[in-house]
Image (spheres, rainbow, N blue to C red):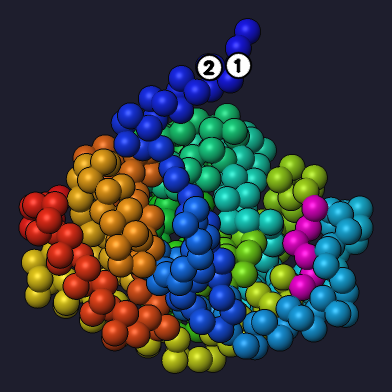
Amino acid sequence: MDFDALFNEQLDALKSDGNYRYFAELERKCGKFPKAANHADDGVRDVTVWCSNDYLGMGQHPKVIDAMKEAVERTGTGAGGTRNISGTNHDHLLLEAELADLHGKEAALIFTSGYVSNWASLSTLGSRLENCVILSDAGNHASMIEGIRHSKAKKVIWRHNDVADLEEKLAAIPADHPKIVAFESVYSMDGDIAPIEAILDVAEKYGAMTYIDEVHAVGMYGKRGGGVSEELGLAHRITLIEGTLGKAFGCVGGYITGSAALCDFIRSFASGFIFTTALPPAVAAAARVSIAHLKESQFERAGQRRQVAKLRAMLDAQGIPHMPNDSHIVPVMIGDPVKTKMLADYLMDEWNIYVQPINYPTVPKGTERLRFTPSPLHTDEDIAYLVSALTVLWKQCAIAHQVA
């Protein structure tokens, strides 16, 4: 059997639909974020990155870089294996203590990525709690969906951010069945924010555990960067807060926080934790310094909010549609996969602006978009240049000036 032919048949179909993912070859430049070198067939050129999830540029912060260098010189480059075989490195425990403090919880547990922390935690909870029912917001991330699916627990999907629908579905579940309400704080594609307090009210009414994914919010919201739950003063009411070290904290890795018993339960039963090599100690050390810095500093968050507001105002002035929301994510709606890819290519080829086209299955068909994430390190000149480019392309491509 010609397996490559089978692979190529499906790849060709993906390309014809306009949903094939092309990856730009970029080289980040230390100390020059959001600039990067784009390696292409015709050579190397500098581009401005507009879609990074390093929201605050902490991956370039001197304190974070120095912490990683020091830890590499002190401990070497790798963890040496899983934590149960090679031992829990001291830097891992220091990071977990920092994370527990960030969210006001008894304990924390780190994973190799935010995807793994969601997948491992939800799959473990759903499989180990007898008769468990997981109520999942319809907009939840793929990592949450996969974790729930792998758990084989009963799954109930409630309409996105619809608390009345959530309550109706909770009320239909037998009272003696363990229930987990799983949702996100900031949804990464639309940038909308969940009605967290209302969700908690309903979950508590029916005795449900609450599981919130704060990956696009940690570092960004709250006085100390604890996420939207901290900003709203609700973290103490949430059973499990999950986050990432790979976005606003500028490193890599994922984590959960909660009670000591909860974290020990996941640590003891989650295959995604037990059987994978631990984060390098240098990554843990750098992440801890980043978290500690953002607990004290408002400078990065304030700068980022200013630049988001400037970009939105300039897009409005030119009549370029962007989805309204209360977060830092600025989705510019296109509504067609081919046009979205074409616009992204034009921005890169003609304007040295890099933004990744967002197509199905990341977003529903017909809602294709360019997703911009201004950072405090994008200058006013960067913003003006981006809006000028979009204005020219909007006229050339005759895209409707309205929000999809």
- The residue at the far top in this view is 1
Quadrant location, the N terminus: top right
Does the magenta stretch mainly form a helix, a strand or a loop?
Answer: loop
In the image: residue 404, left or right of residue 140 = left
In the image: residue 42, left or right of residue 30 = left
Vertical arrangement, residue 353 with respect to residue 303, above or below: above
Q: Across the whole image, how many numbered discs are drawn on residues?
A: 2
Q: How many angstroms separate mark 2 from mark 1 (CA)?
A: 5 Å
Vertical arrangement, residue 122 with respect to residue 46, above or below: above
Secondary structure type for disc 1: helix
Is-magenta flag for residue 401?
A: no
Residue 257 place in picture, x, y as percent = 61, 64
Identify the disc placed on residue 3: 1
In the image: residue 253, left or right of residue 235 = right
Secondary structure type for disc 2: helix
Q: Nearer the viewer, residue 366 or 146?
A: 366
Residue 120 place in picture, x, y as percent = 64, 46
Q: Label 1 sits on what residue type?
A: Phe
Residue bearing the label numbered 2: 6
